[in-house]
Amino acid sequence: MLQKYLIKNISVVNEGKILSRDVFIKKGRIEKMAEKIVTREAVIEINGEGKYLLPGVIDDQVHFREPGLTHKATIYTESKAAVAGGVTSFMEMPNTMPPAFTQELLEQKYEIGRHTSLANYSFFMGTSNDNTDEALRTNEKKRNICGIKIFMGSSTGGLLVDSPLALDKLFSESEVLIATHCENEKIIKANYERLKNEKGILTAADHPLIRDEENCFESSFYAIQFAKKHNSRLHILHISTEKELQLFTNLIPLKDKRITAEVCVHHLHFTADDYATKGNLIKCNPAIKAAYNRDALWKALLDDRLDIIATDHAPHTWEEKNEPYEKAHAGLPLVQHSLSLMLHYVKQGKISLEKVVEKMSHAVADCFQVAERGYIREGYYADLVIVHPDRPTRVTKENIFYKCGWSPLEGFVFPSAITHTFINGHLVYGNGMWDESQQGERLTFDRV
């Protein structure tokens, strides 16, 4: 039985405005929003004075490792971390063990989500050089699956798609969004062999030299040629270079774009200078690069060439990250701290709170055509987050919910705190207390 909540006198951040409102939550939905709400119904009242109400973050790129890699993470543990950080919905990638190469394997992941995920969920269909027909069966489920994922650069488990025939078929026939990891395998290998011959022993500081700007640009350019040829709906994940930004436009509104782009929080926060202290902890693909790329990404985010902020949350064990560079696994755990990190930049004056909400909630819902989420609107699902803007929060091992138990942000002090997270009107997380009596729901999509 869902409780009814009345949030009083809170600053609602929504659709480019911040307005003081009361918000009534009933039957999992936003029943009413007004300057003042009086009701005779039995409700749990929350005092919102001095706080902000945000639509829940929708993270369109996470790796929760289940099935098969559950020593790193599970859908339960990482969804819990997500909820603690104000992420109410996620879209998870297919490079699990086994990879989601068939519709049956994909639906098995949805079953795990149905039973264990505290947040709302969707899972991408995986692609390979050999499963194009199976991957394109996703067209039959376009209202129930977020999209198909193509790794155009190196990956694990046979997920690399480098056959021009396979790529042409996927781009020409997919009726759902295609999300791509764009890196060029030939350039990466050539860079690696050159540096290995020159230096012998490589370190994390060599990572952005191996996975360089040219590698990313060539692959993104290649994907865009396929998308333009077939008028495909292409979304390029984790843009990390200044050079790639020339491929994207801000001259048309998001709803009319056929080619969109995402930036991840670690590429907005770290630079190659941080390898000196963080080492393999910030090793990820595509690599964190020289500082001028970060500066360019910020500019493109603010002028709308970059459409979405996400995490590419990719946890590994502490032992896996502390191997020598060439063996150390690539990826960072970030989903618990993405919103808090962006709120830090709000305090710094780098970005407005309204823009954060646009890029982490509204734009994701619009880009993927998520049904009835991503906005604070009457009738929409009550996926909501309350933020205390002046409650500093330090990242420590004791308050990290990732199964891997570490964060590259450990010791960082955020200026704000996530105090409440509602999923479908259910208060899962409130002032450090958990109510895990209800799971999240499968996302649906408004696609014809």
Image: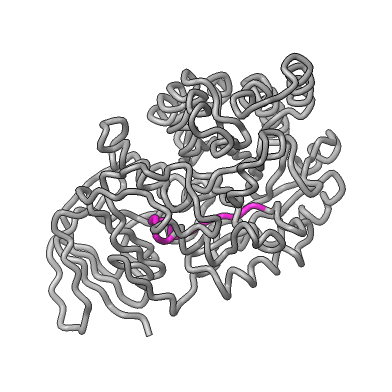
The answer to whether residue 87 shows anywhere in this view is yes
296 vs 384, left or right, is right
Q: Position of residue 73 (x, y in %)?
A: 59, 59
Question: Quick one: quadrant of the N terminus?
Answer: bottom left
192 vs 261, left or right, is right
132 vs 274, left or right, is right
The answer to whether residue 448 shows anywhere in this view is no
Along the line of sight, the residue nearer the viewer: 6 or 171: 6
Q: Residue at x 70, y 56 (%)?
A: 96
Q: Residue at x 60, y 43 (%)?
A: 331
Q: Residue at x 28, y 58 (%)?
A: 386
Where residue 247 sits, quadrant-wise, is top right
- The image shows residue 144, relative to residue 342, as above or below, that is below
Residue most toward the top?
A: 198
Question: Quick one: quadrant of the C terminus?
Answer: bottom right
Q: Is residue 89 magenta?
A: yes
Along the line of sight, the residue nearer the viewer: 209 or 356: 209
Along the line of sight, the residue nearer the viewer: 304 or 415: 415
108 vs 424, left or right, is right
For the record, the magenta segment spans 83-93
- The image shows residue 149, relative to residue 195, as above or below, that is below
Where residue 188 sits, quadrant-wise, is top right
- The image shows residue 275, relative to residue 6, as above or below, that is above
Q: Position of residue 154 (x, y in %)?
A: 75, 37
Along the line of sight, the residue nearer the viewer: 393 or 309: 393
How many discs mark residues in the rendered view? 0
Q: Position of residue 325 (x, y in %)?
A: 66, 34
Q: Is residue 284 magenta?
A: no
Q: In the rendered view, how is the structure colored? A: one colour
Q: Position of residue 112 (x, y in %)?
A: 63, 70
Q: Residue at x 31, y 43 (%)?
A: 413
